């Protein structure tokens, strides 16, 4: 059964009734002149204006787009809460192939819809949108971040994302081995793109034994030509089986931790930049059962969102770096809570984030 919007009843049920939902607001946007069709989902504004990027993607249908926006917005609430930001969670999706339909007119129309929310939602880049696009959106909407430095923005967020992941790794080492140093530890990085290649630099500097893989040969070559000691392996399958691997860092796509990979991982720690590393609920428990320490992805990869949030106040790299450095303490606190409550770190992170949102909402009601 569908309602007049074509949104299936189960999606509406998720929105209003399910424990997985509880979103505050969902806005369906259409500008027929430019062909824009977008969904803006605000999961929570308990901690402040909802912040999250705009995904531009050729969804198979509108219902899939709504479902994705709802999931992504909820994820941003948790990520922003754990990053200590005064921002709730939101996300927007634009339906269509960006290669084919992205135009200045469409982005401007999108900017007007975001502006119509009056600051309840702050947008940024995500899959399929780039700093140049945010520069255009910003012409219609001041609640836009992730812009280019020439337009008052902070630019590429991968530098601080990598720095945050590195801090998460150091915290994992501290928790597991009693020392944050990664010196002489074997660290395997799957995906040496924007974030992964910066991560290599931190690890090489610290004296780790680094292994890398990527589906793009040139990405691997760029690293091995610069650092002769970095070892390139054929693929992720080989990487996760490297003997004596201390840390595995998924830095490519989501779903890296699944029923096929978890049983064969040689690493003692998983800590990487990729979003949604756990392929399905329950994988976090499988990791814990194998004695593998998992540093929750949305906690350690928050350097990027810390940067875009900072941009709203006039970007300052050193201030942002100091905030991203706190990922070390946050990760340690999650491991401590996990131990205390007898639950996997991913569940502990969710509990801490939910508590922060709950407390903020209660404080607001009391005012
Ligand atoms: N860029 C950021 O600031 C940021 C922030 C938070 C999270 N993330 C997440 O981190 C991950 C990496 O982001 P990025 O910005 O570096 O993206 P990117 O596209 O620059 O890099 C990803 C790399 O992974 C490689 N890759 C793809 N499939 C692979 C496979 N099967 N095996 C090995 N390598 C593979 C690609 O060739 C590419 O080099 C993504 O999941 C992204 O969502 C990025």
Image: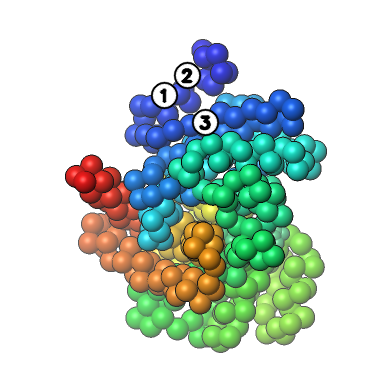
Asked if disc 2 and disc 1 are in contact, CB closer than 8 Å, the reply is yes
Q: Is residue 97 left or right of residue 343?
A: right
First along the sequence among labels 3 and 2: 2
CA separation in Å, label 3 and label 2: 17 Å
**Residue placed at 63% from the left, 44% from the top?**
140
The answer to whether residue 264 shows anywhere in this view is: no
Rounded to the nearest angstrom, the CA distance separating label 2 from label 1 is 6 Å
The x and y percentages for residue 161 are 55, 66
Residues 331 and 149: in front is: 149
Q: Residues within 10 Å of mark 1 (few under 14, many from 20)?
A: few
Tag 3 and tag 1, C-beta contact below 8 Å: no
Q: Element under label 1? A: helix
Q: Please give the residue where the numbered disc 1 appears in the rendered image.
A: 13
Q: Nearer the viewer, mark 3 or mark 2?
A: 3
Numbered disc in front, either 3 or 1: 3
At horizontal 55% and vertical 41% (from top left) the residue drawn is: 115
Instruction: Find disc 2 in the rendering and name its residue.
Output: 9
The answer to which of marks 3 and 1 sits earlier in the sequence is: 1
Q: Are marks 3 and 2 in contact (CB under 8 Å)?
A: no
**Disc number for residue 27:** 3
The 10 Å Cα crowd at callout 2, few under 14, some 14 to 19, many 20 or more, is few
Q: Is residue 353 above or below residue 229?
A: above
Cβ at disc 2 under 8 Å from ligand 1 = no
Q: Nearer the viewer, residue 171 or 22?
A: 22
């Amino acid at each position: 059964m569908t309602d007049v919007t074509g949104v299936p009843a189960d999606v509406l049920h998720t929105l209003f009734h399910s424990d997985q939902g509880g979103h505050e607001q969902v806005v369906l946007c259409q500008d027929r002149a430019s062909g824009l069709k977008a969904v803006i989902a605000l999961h929570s504004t308990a901690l402040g204006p909802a912040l999250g990027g705009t995904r531009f993607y050729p969804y198979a249908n509108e219902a899939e787009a709504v479902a994705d926006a709802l999931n992504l917005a909820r994820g941003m609430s948790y990520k922003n809460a754990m990053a200590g930001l005064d921002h709730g969670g939101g996300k927007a999706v634009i339906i269509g192939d960006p290669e084919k339909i992205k135009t200045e007119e469409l982005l401007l129309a999108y900017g007007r819809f975001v502006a119509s929310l009056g600051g309840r939602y702050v947008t940024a880049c995500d899959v399929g949108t780039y700093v140049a696009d945010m520069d255009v959106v910003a012409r219609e909407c001041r609640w836009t971040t992730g812009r280019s430095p020439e337009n008052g923005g902070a630019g590429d967020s991968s530098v601080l994302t990598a720095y945050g992941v590195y801090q998460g790794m150091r915290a994992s080492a501290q928790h597991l081995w009693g020392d944050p140093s990664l010196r002489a530890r074997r660290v395997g990085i799957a995906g040496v793109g924007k974030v992964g290649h910066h991560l290599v630099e931190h690890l090489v500097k610290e004296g780790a034994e680094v292994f890398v893989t990527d589906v793009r040969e040139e990405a691997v070559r760029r690293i091995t030509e610069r650092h002769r000691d970095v070892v390139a392996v054929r693929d992720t399958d080989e990487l996760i089986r490297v003997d004596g691997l201390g840390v595995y860092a998924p830095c490519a796509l989501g779903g890296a931790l699944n029923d096929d990979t978890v049983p064969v991982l040689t690493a003692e720690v998983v800590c990487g930049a990729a979003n949604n590393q756990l392929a399905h609920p329950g994988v976090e428990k499988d990791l814990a059962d194998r004695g593998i320490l998992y540093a929750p992805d949305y906690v350690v990869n928050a350097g990027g969102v810390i940067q875009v949030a900072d941009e709203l106040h006039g970007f300052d790299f050193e201030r942002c770096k100091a905030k991203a450095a706190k990922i070390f303490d946050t990760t340690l606190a999650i491991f401590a809570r996990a131990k205390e409550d007898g639950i996997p770190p991913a569940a502990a992170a969710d509990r801490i984030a939910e508590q922060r949102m709950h407390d903020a909402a209660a404080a607001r009601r009391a005012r």
